[in-house]
Image: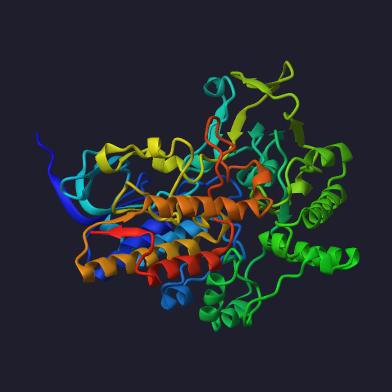
Amino acid sequence: MSIKTEVFDVAIVGAGFAGMYMLHRLRQMGLTAIVFEAGDDVGGTWYWNRYPGARCDAESLAYSFSFSPELEQEWEWSERYAPQPEILAYARHVSERFDLRRDIHFETRVTSAHYQDDSLNWHLETDKGHSVVANFCVMATGCLSVPQLPDIPGVQDFKGNFYQASMWPHDPVSFKGQRVGIIGTGSSGIQAIPVIAEEADHLTVFQRTPNFSVPAKNEPLDQNWVDEFKKHYRAHRENHKVGNGSGFGDLNIEPREGPIEPVLRSQLTDEEATQILEDAWESGGARFMGAIGDQLMNEEANRFAMEFVHRKIHETVKDQETANLLCPTNHPIGTRRICVDTDYYETYNRKNVSLVSVKDNPIEKITEHGVMVNGEVTELDTLVLATGFDAMTGALLNIDIRGKEGLLLSDKWHAGPRSYLGIAVSDFPNLFTITGPGSPSVLSNMLVSIEQHVEWMIDCLTHMKKKDLKVIEAQPQAEDRWVSHVNDVANMTLFPKGGSWYLGANVKGKPRIFMPYAAGVGAYREVCDEVTAKDYEGFTFH
């Protein structure tokens, strides 16, 4: 039986926040679009990551869509940092409010996307037998959407309850009366550990590399405060978009006016710098990293912040040997994703929690009944993996994507991802990547970056429609310049010293190249706007 090929203006892969917003804006343009989503609901990362304690590390009122003033006024967040179920409920609300679901095919994975040199369009196929031709293909696959299994023998041999943080069951999971082990102390582990410890009979944390974490100071939102904040929502949204920050916003009711000059470490006495860090610690959240303006640029400023956090860990954790193990020393603070927690360090004061460092004595194997370290097996009823993602590129390289003359994206990126602006890839015409490698993406408030990318793409498509242009392609020279610029910017900071997934360092055999753009969402927006103003400099149309 022959498969009927459907024809659309645009095919979108992924129904997280990026895919949903892209669909909404394409409809406003009058273009036809189809979305394919592997999950059975919208939400992207917030659909998959249901592990205990999962919540956003950006304030709820900032981590939300700004395109609809009506939406932002009507939706009510319950906490300063929204928990996963609430963010998923928000995603569902958006999909229903804007009637998006009728164009989304759920539980469907795109297996291939091939550019057709003769017809100048894209042909996509799925695991459910769809055959789609579209003039444009938009990858809204997310930056943190492909789970990374640790390279430990015997992972599949464990006979007890086995869970992966980024593929958590939809049904409730109980840890009552159980001996639980968790491998991984990145963001997911740091959020899950305190919650699991409250319920488990005993929790053993297997830590290879400690991560820096700052307190969230999460709390229920005060309705009167929210009402006052929302009176200035539009001005706050503009502040999120500009400047050299990450777009996380602020907690002041009155929006700031004009740029804020950063306070540098050299301008401060030790006492003044300590007080600034203390205030940021008590305020809570990832903005701790911006409290002193050059913490990610200046090694001395970074060391000062690092020692401050070390002292906080030692003040919090009663057992000083455990506190020592929890103090990161192998990377500057903030060069790996800074974690935001609720009672993480306090959890190690519980009698039912043990910390096992596997830095010097790696996990030898996972057995049927537990985890073996140094010849001894810690017996477990439940094992949880919180070992992160094949970030930025994993989802794209899991699809058979081919550009001009059948060029495989995996071959194009064999030495690391290359793109122009994180939006387009040379030799892959009419292919757009939302928050792709080379854009601020994971160093920013993702909703701010998603909206900026989608709006740039919509402006570009509108330009092409008016000019009756069929094909857009990034120029190789522009791509080379941009990749070089992204790495030059990163090398002006301490980020490359982090050895993190920003460089692909958590995936065995993955080429080391700094993937996100570190200059901030404001500087990046200016670059993109300038490209547009110069008649889409760096792109070729026909």
Q: Please state, as top left, top right, bottom left or bottom right, where the C terminus lies in the image.
A: bottom left
Q: Please state, as top left, top right, bottom left or bottom right, where the N terminus lies in the image.
A: top left
Task: Name the foreground residue: 175 vs 11.
Answer: 11
The answer to whether residue 2 of the structure is visible from this angle is yes
Query: Against 287, is 413 above or below?
Result: above
Q: Horizontal and vertical percent for residue 92? A: 40, 59
Horizontal arrangement in the rendering, residue 428 relative to residue 205 (left or right): left
Q: Horizontal and vertical percent for residue 254? A: 63, 82
Q: Residue furthest top?
A: 375
Query: Against 160, is 403 above or below?
Result: below
Q: Quadrant of residue 199?
A: top right
Horizontal arrangement in the rendering, residue 219 relative to residue 280 (left or right): left
Q: Horizontal and vertical percent for residue 287? A: 68, 63
Q: Residue at x 59, y 46 (%)?
A: 52
Horizontal arrangement in the rendering, residue 362 relative to residue 458 (left or right): right
Q: Quadrant of residue 131?
A: top left
The answer to whether residue 43 of the structure is visible from this angle is no
Query: Against 455, is 69 above or below?
Result: below
Colouring style: rainbow
Q: Residue at x 56, y 77 (%)?
A: 236
Q: Residue furthest front?
A: 477
| Count of numbered marks | 0
Horizontal arrangement in the rendering, residue 287 relative to residue 460 (left or right): right
Q: Residue at x 73, y 44 (%)?
A: 331
Task: Name the foreground residue: 257 vs 322.
Answer: 257
Q: Horizontal and vertical percent for residue 249? A: 60, 70
